[in-house]
Amino acid sequence: MPEEQAFSVLVKIMFDYGLRELFKQNFEDLHCKFYQLERLMQEYIADLYTHFLEISLEAHMYASQWFLTLFTAKFPLYMVFHIIDLLLCEGISVIFNVALGLLKTSKDDLLLTDFEGALKFFRVQLPKRYRSEDNAKKLMELACSLKISQKKLKKYEREYHMMREQQAQQEDPLERFERENKRLQEANMRLEQENDDLAHELVTSKIALRKDLDNAEEKADALNKELLMTKQKLIDAEEEKRRLAEESGQLKEMCRRELDKAESEIKKNNSIIGDYKQICSQLSDRLEKQQSSNKAEIEKIRQKVDGCERCREFFNTEGRVRLVSAIKENSAEEDTDEEKESLKNQLREMELELAQTKLQLVEAECKIQDLEHHLGLALNEVQAAKKTWFNRTISSIKTATGVQGKETS
């Protein structure tokens, strides 16, 4: 149940159901309830009433908590819930039904006790008995079965007030005034004590509030300082952001320039490589043509050598010159000195032509190697240009980052 509803129920019970009257005027209405309970005991439980008179046990000694706390002081909650439900339905007279039910169910035990035993029974043994839900249920059934009319309660209430009036008339006025004066003095002392307590509590509250106010002001000053520092840090951060944005724009512009420069160098190198490739292809074509022409010349010479019977003796099938000793053995007797000389001359000419052809081949191979070397150099220059542009970009970024770090530190 929410707190608002619980407070509304409390107000309803205290004012509309008359529970507040029990605490007013020196508990006068509570003593009236005790007189009504004793008169009900005299009617419904006469033997127990007589026993309580014999041991001088009065109702206020055991039933005060029943009326003031609605049985919540000693009894279990599930039993109290039933009692409060009946109270909300029937009124405060339900307390008499429950009280008579408790006394009836405990009559046999109470008749065997004395004054001390009866008080102990009401304080200890009676609440333990109703920890069982079955006993509590039987008690509530018994309480509901008791019929206590409002007329009878009103009659007992009138008897109580008449008795109080007779006692007041029989009492000495001086004693009554002294008792009333004493009661008023006690009430005055109680009110003064409450006033002192409230004043002490007020001073303590003021001191605590002052301390809280000082702490709050200190916290506010600290928060203001932190706010100022945060604002300054925010300004510095915005300035740093602006400076970094400018540096970033400069780096972007520098990178763009380097990229344009690198692209122009790459285009230039690509054009150079294209020229080198074209030259190499032309030289390769010329070399192939030269080799084909040399092969054709060699083939013509070989055909001429094969067509000449004498020359065939000096060359083998692979076109190489045979050994002179073998030629001498084959033609020692046939050749003359002049023929030898002419053959030697022809052999020298042919060897010279062959050497020239080999020299041309070697020159062509050297040119090819030179072109390949130049091509490799050109490729290395292109790679170096690319690496140089990349290294320049990285170094410029590192330089800018290093300068920025120094400024920040």
Image: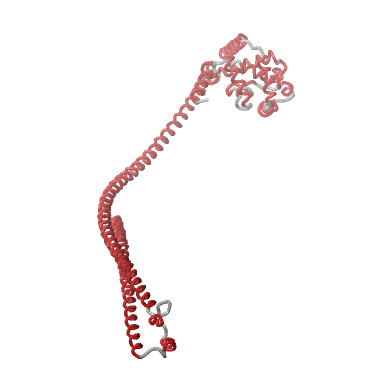
Residue 168 at x, y percent in the picture: 56, 14
The answer to whether residue 406 shows anywhere in this view is: no
224 vs 252, nearest the viewer: 252
64 sits left or right of 135 in the view: left
307 vs 211, nearest the viewer: 307
Q: How is the image coloured?
A: secondary structure
The answer to whether residue 257 shows anywhere in this view is: yes
Residue 14 at x, y percent in the picture: 52, 19
Q: Residue at x 34, y 78 (%)?
A: 354
Q: Is residue 258 above or below residue 153?
A: below
121 vs 188, nearest the viewer: 121
Residue 20 at x, y percent in the picture: 53, 19
Q: Is residue 33 above or below residue 398?
A: above
Q: Residue at x 32, y 72 (%)?
A: 364
68 sits left or right of 403 in the view: right
Q: Is residue 269 above or below residue 192?
A: below
- Using the rendered view, name the quadrant where residue 89 is placed: top right
- Using the rendered view, name the quadrant where residue 357 is placed: bottom left
Q: From the image, which quarter does the C terminus lie in?
A: bottom left
